[in-house]
Amino acid sequence: MAIDSNLERAFKRITNSGATSTRPILQCVRIEDGAAFATDSHRALLFKEYSQDKTLQMLLNLRTFTIDDESNYPDIRRLMQVDGKVSFELSNLQAEQIQAFCRMIVRLNGNRQIVDISINGRSLEISSHESKDDLTRTSIKLQVNQSAYLEPYKDDESFELSCDATYLMQALEYFTGIKGAWHDQLLVRMDLPLKPFMISNSNTEYLLTPVRVF
């Protein structure tokens, strides 16, 4: 079964970081109903049109290329649930700008690889996680194409969460690496500051877990 190199790289990043001695099952990609899914418990990637064979079902270990037992694998349907109480769209260019900003944060901050995301109306700000009065704090501000707010949020109130800069960078690298990606908008959906949020296009859902900051 052939697999796109961009998708393969994205899956391997997740399975390589998620595989531990206590949860070796996270070395695997689950293939079911024509879709492929991987998680490391901090992020998850669902590719909806992986195979035309809808009857194919397996747990493929990407390290050993063997078939593993599926009984203990996380429930995909439960994990990939984000209502999108706050949502907005990103163009490919905006995704590349955020990706480049995250790469800079990772290079400059070493182990302190956290960025804060703030959305207020159509204004999106991605910032390095420092105190508000820290002179080294840096950010990028963008006007998103479209935004929507559901209860209990209002479009004149700022919604904020924090996440791992490396994970956000790698998620956006996947989307901007898709052939013909310039024609697509990305949809970002968020619910609560500490609940997983999702970046998606028509065929892929990429889930990221926020981090708690103090």
Image: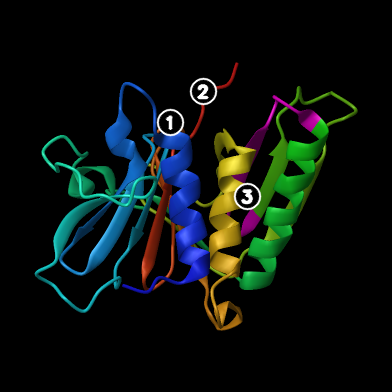
Tell me which corner region of the image, top left, top right, bottom left or bottom right, holds residue 11: bottom left
**Which residue position holds label 2?**
212
Mark 2 or mark 3: which is in front? 3
**Which residue position holds label 3?**
169
Q: CA distance from mark 2 to mark 3?
A: 19 Å
Q: Position of residue 84 (x, y in %)?
A: 37, 53
Question: How many badges with numbers are in the image?
Answer: 3
Q: Amino acid at mark 1?
A: Leu
Which numbered marker is on residue 60?
A: none
Q: Which residue is nearer to you in this view: 88 or 196?
A: 196
Asked if the residues shown at circle 2 and circle 3 are in contact, with their CB atoms under 8 angstroms apart, the answer is no
Q: Residue at x 29, y 73 (%)?
A: 49
**Which residue position holds label 1?**
194
Q: Is residue 26 above or below residue 29?
A: above
Which quarter shows the C terminus? top right
Binning the other alpha carbons within 10 Å of mark 3 as few (below 14), some (14 to 19) or many (20 upward) gives many
Q: Which residue is nearer to you in this view: 149 or 33?
A: 33
User: In the rendered structure, does residue 149 fall within the stretch colored magenta?
Assistant: no
Which quarter shows the N terminus? bottom left
Q: Is residue 16 above or below residue 51?
A: above
